[in-house]
Amino acid sequence: MSIGFYFDMSRCTGCRACQIACKDKNRLEVGTIYRNAHTFSVGSFPEVKCYSYSASCNHCESPACMAACPTGAIDKREDGAVILDREVCKGDGACVEACPYGVPKLWEDGKAGKCDSCYLIREAGGTPACVAACPNRALDFGEVEELKKKYGDALVSDIAVLPSSDKTKPNVYINAKEAATETGFTEVDW
């Protein structure tokens, strides 16, 4: 069994409620985020197309962060969630360098941190904070095969703003807008 996130670009407005809920739930210090909502544009006037993408840990099948960690601070749970134990982390940053998605972050205390899929909330019967906070239901979380059944076969894990999924096999399934497959994108800084 593997868990993962579903993201629907047609529903996301880039409001960042998911990002704020994650930051609040994890009590992250200023400047540190585990889920990041970005807005991108492609094309030029008058043919500009925009889309938003909310990114966090993809709980990869082959997590590069886990393979790179010299202390064993990163482990993959039986359900597929990739968890970083900050108590074991020595802060050498190998996981930060290894993750092609830029997910693990070094805190001011020198130790790394990342999305843990709100596994304690899930064990208590809840949903991840980011999913619960999304007002447009652009995010979902669950067992990968169930997500695929629920949302269909047109889901992708590769969009232009992400590195190729070949290396780590991320468990993120995206209902992508056509613009998200086009190169030549620019991040919009609100």
Image (tube, rainbow, N blue to C red):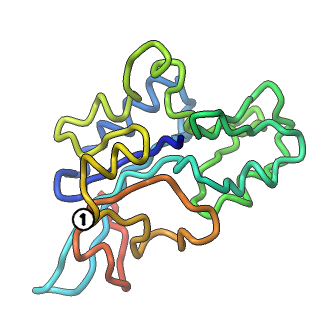
On the image, the x and y values in percent for residue 37 come to 37, 51
Q: Name the kind of residue labelled 1 in the image.
A: Tyr
Q: Residues within 10 Å of mark 1 (few under 14, many from 20)?
A: many
Q: Quadrant of residue 178?
A: bottom left
Residue sitting farthest toward the left:
46
On the image, the x and y values in percent for residue 129 come to 39, 28
Which residue is more in the foreground, 70 or 25? 70
Q: Is residue 138 above or below residue 41?
A: above
Q: Is residue 166 above or below residue 59?
A: below
Which residue is more in the foreground, 48 or 55? 55
Q: Is residue 134 above or below residue 68?
A: above
On the image, the x and y values in percent for residue 50 come to 21, 69
On the image, the x and y values in percent for residue 28 come to 55, 29
Residue located 80% across and 36% down the image = 73
Residue located 51% across and 34% down the image = 117
Q: Is residue 15 left or right of residue 101?
A: left
Residue located 74% across and 29% down the image = 86
Q: Quadrant of residue 15?
A: top left
Residue sitting farthest toward the top:
124
Q: Is residue 102 left or right of residue 13?
A: right
Q: Secondary structure at mark 1?
A: strand
Check disc 1 and report the residue beneath it: 51
